[in-house]
């Protein structure tokens, strides 16, 4: 099944350059994935209620091919592209009104037990061989992110509005912490070609997090840490 919807690049998802922002992009991707899962009755609210489990994003890699202007109509397509016993990959394509790819995401997800926090087999939340897997529309592979030589550039506290219904900091909020290390002018000038995020662990309301960063000619590497240990790692190719 390919979940499909039509959107406008509205004021809530554009940046100071009046184009779809990086945070807006990740918001659109998250919404598309959760709505696709909802159409399959695999969304986080349903599996929490029925199986005492919840989804976590473990990796997300996005390739960018262009930018959407404010008010521009675009199409979002989201679908399962891979299944294994312990994880699932959901791809999401953003296309402009001409049908050309603007951005493409491949997001790896796994199921955690609500009581123990341990990884569960996805079959325990009702996923079996009958689920249709669609062919990816863009080739994406995940890379190892080396964050060994980063400098601390910010310190943030997880607040109530950063937390989702699983009671942990939402995955897009980490990207907000990451992109807040850039000025508005720098974000407008940032021509990202790829953004990859590795979600290593979780954080919760009240946790103190540090943001670390290195910048080079072709890529920026960032990490959000708690007590010195990685919570997420991110690389931005430009």
Image: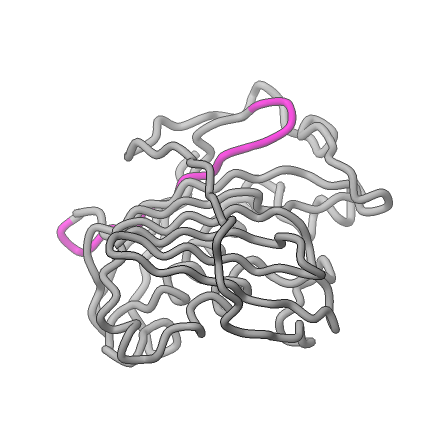
Boundaries of the magenta span:
84-98
Q: Provide the major secondary structure of the magenta segment.
A: strand
96 or 143, nearer to the observer: 143
Instruction: Indicate the position of residue 93 as horizontal and vertical percent values.
Output: 32, 46
Task: Identify the residue at image location x=47%, y=44%.
Answer: 146
Q: Quadrant of the C terminus?
A: bottom left
In the image, residue 59 lies in the stretch drawn in magenta: no
| Vertical placement of residue 76 versus 110, above or below | below
Residue drawn at (36%, 47%) of the image: 62
- Give the side of residue 45 with respect to residue 185, left or right: right
Magenta span contains residue 97:
yes
Q: What is the residue that sits farthest to the top in this orientation? A: 129
Which residue is at 22% across, 70% downward? 189
* Picture residue at 56% right of the left edge, 58% below the top: 171
Q: Is residue 164 above or below residue 101?
A: below
Tell me: 202 left or right of 49: left
């Amino acid at each position: 099944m390919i979940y499909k919807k039509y959107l406008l690049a509205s004021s809530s998802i554009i940046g100071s350059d009046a184009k779809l922002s990086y945070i807006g992009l990740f918001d659109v991707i998250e919404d598309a994935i959760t709505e696709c899962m909802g159409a399959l009755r695999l969304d986080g609210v349903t599996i929490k209620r029925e199986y005492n489990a919840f989804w976590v994003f473990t990796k997300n890699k996005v390739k960018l091919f262009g930018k959407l202007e404010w008010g521009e109509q675009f199409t979002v397509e989201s679908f399962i592209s891979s299944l294994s016993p312990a994880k699932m990959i959901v791809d999401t394509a953003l296309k402009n009104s001409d049908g050309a790819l603007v951005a493409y995401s491949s997001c790896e997800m796994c199921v955690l037990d609500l009581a123990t926090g341990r990884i569960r087999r996805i079959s325990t939340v009702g996923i079996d061989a009958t689920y249709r897997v669609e062919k990816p529309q863009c080739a994406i592979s995940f890379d190892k992110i080396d964050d060994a030589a980063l400098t601390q550039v910010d310190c943030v506290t997880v607040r109530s509005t950063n937390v989702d219904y699983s009671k942990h900091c939402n995955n897009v909020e980490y990207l907000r912490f990451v992109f807040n290390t850039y000025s508005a002018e720098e974000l407008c000038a940032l021509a990202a070609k790829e953004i990859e995020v590795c979600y290593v662990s979780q954080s919760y309301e009240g946790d103190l997090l540090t943001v670390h960063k290195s910048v080079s000619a072709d890529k920026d590497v960032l990490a959000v840490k708690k007590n010195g240990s990685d919570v997420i790692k991110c690389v931005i190719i430009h």
